[in-house]
Image (cartoon, rainbow, N blue to C red):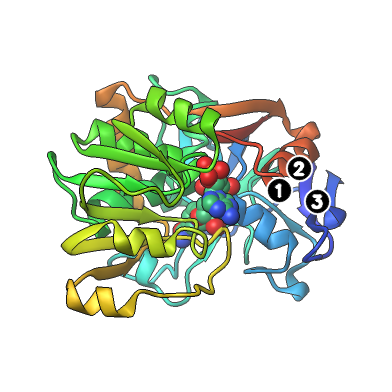
Amino acid sequence: MFAVYAESFSTDDPLSGLVVGERPDPVAPDGWTTVTVKAASLNHHDLWSLRGVGLKEDKLPMILGCDAAGIDEDGNEVVVHAVVSDPNWRGDETFDPGRSLLSEHHQGSFADKVVVPRGNVVPKPASLSFEQAACLPTAWLTAYRMLFTQGGLKPGDSVLVQGAGGGVATALITLARAGGLKVFATSRDEAKRAKALELGAHEVFESGERLPFKVDAVMETVGRATWSHSVRSLRPGGKIVISGTTSGPDVDDAGLMRIFFLQLQVIGSTMGTRDELGSLVQLLDASGSAPLIDRTMPMEQARDGFAAMADGDVFGKIVFTR
Ligand SMILES: NC(=O)c1ccc[n+]([C@@H]2O[C@H](COP(=O)([O-])OP(=O)(O)OC[C@H]3O[C@@H](n4cnc5c(N)ncnc54)[C@H](OP(=O)(O)O)[C@@H]3O)[C@@H](O)[C@H]2O)c1
């Protein structure tokens, strides 16, 4: 079948190990189902994989892609949940120490077909296109859990979203607004700040700029470049919820004194559960909100999408179609 896969790793030139070609058809083990992929979206995770982060050499060649929407064996339109946990695991799948994301241990979604455990599909509502639904399993689910589960944010609370252009960041802005929050966002880029306002941010700021007031929570995916500003932007008792470090994990100043003196909370967040994916789908269906798609392209042109993400030339999600 057609597939986009990693053949080798390179830290400096991740696209050198990317192949757009053919891989054998997958075989669904007992309890798994085959989903015919209609659309799949790109995540920074796919670039990390090509750099050898989160993917082991003995797993190569590996079909990339965590996210997909398509049609299952019974003809249902579905969204794929990308977190694969032990079948005997009970409770929140993201706490299973043996969990993995599609494209880490199991072949990913940038292909004609992807096989997943039967429990890993959620019905796709008619209100979302396959392209929109394909944005949900990683970036949007991560944003949902950051705001509402780990952040515990409620209508009327205030939140700062750092680095407005990313897939997670655009999801955070849309979901925060849909959830009745006061939303601030930062971006290095004036055009991206303007788009963040269109998307629903109440006010936008340059990276590092002082906010008009201290917020209840900051959503972090940028890491090193924005961390100090995140710590400085919180009210006493406020929370930083962090799910990524695009600009690097090693901060110059962690702000430890401010963290203890203001009794701040630093909370990690990773992906989300199948139930949270179901709740996210229902929230979008009910609110009429939909994922912001930067561009859609046939999966054959996946290399261009990877290059755009590596250059930071993106506002919203990049979606591949079959
Ligand atoms: N833990 C999880 O489950 C999980 C799930 C999804 C994603 N992630 C992680 O979350 C991060 C975001 O992923 P993504 O796919 O949404 O998008 P992304 O392409 O990694 O994010 C791009 C955004 O990061 C900001 N940024 C990058 N370098 C920066 C710098 N030096 N200074 C300031 N801002 C900078 C930019 O904001 P501006 O250009 O607007 O300033 C840009 O729009 C990634 O690291 C990813 O691995 C984690």
* Spatial separation of the CA atoms under disc 2 and disc 1: 5 Å
| x 35%, y 59%: residue | 230
Question: Residue 184, position in %: x, y?
Answer: 31, 40
Is 91 positioned to the left or the right of 31 in the image?
left
Q: Amino acid at mark 1?
A: Ala
Question: Residue 192, position in %: x, y?
Answer: 52, 32
* Spatial separation of the CA atoms under disc 2 and disc 3: 26 Å
Disc 1: CA contacts within 10 A as few (<14), some (14-19) or many (>=20):
some
Is 265 positioned to the left or the right of 2 in the image?
left
- In the rendered image, which quarter contains the N terminus? top right
Residue beneath disc 3: 24
In the image, is residue 118 above or below residue 296? below
* Spatial separation of the CA atoms under disc 3 and disc 1: 28 Å
Q: Which type of secondary structure does the marked residue at label 3 adopt?
A: loop
Is 287 positioned to the left or the right of 109 in the image?
left
Q: Amino acid at mark 3?
A: Pro
Mark earlier in primary sequence (2, 3): 3
Q: Which type of secondary structure does the marked residue at label 2 adopt?
A: helix
Residue beneath disc 2: 307
Disc 2: CA contacts within 10 A as few (<14), some (14-19) or many (>=20):
some
Residue beneath disc 1: 310
Mark earlier in primary sequence (3, 1): 3
Q: Nearer the viewer, residue 220 or 146?
A: 220
Single out the mark in the foreground, 3 or 1.
1
Q: Which type of secondary structure does the marked residue at label 1 adopt?
A: helix
Q: Nearer the viewer, residue 14 or 245?
A: 245
| x 42%, y 63%: residue | 227
Answer yes or no: do the residues labelled 2 and 1 have beta carbons within 8 Å?
yes
Q: Nearer the viewer, residue 165 or 261?
A: 261
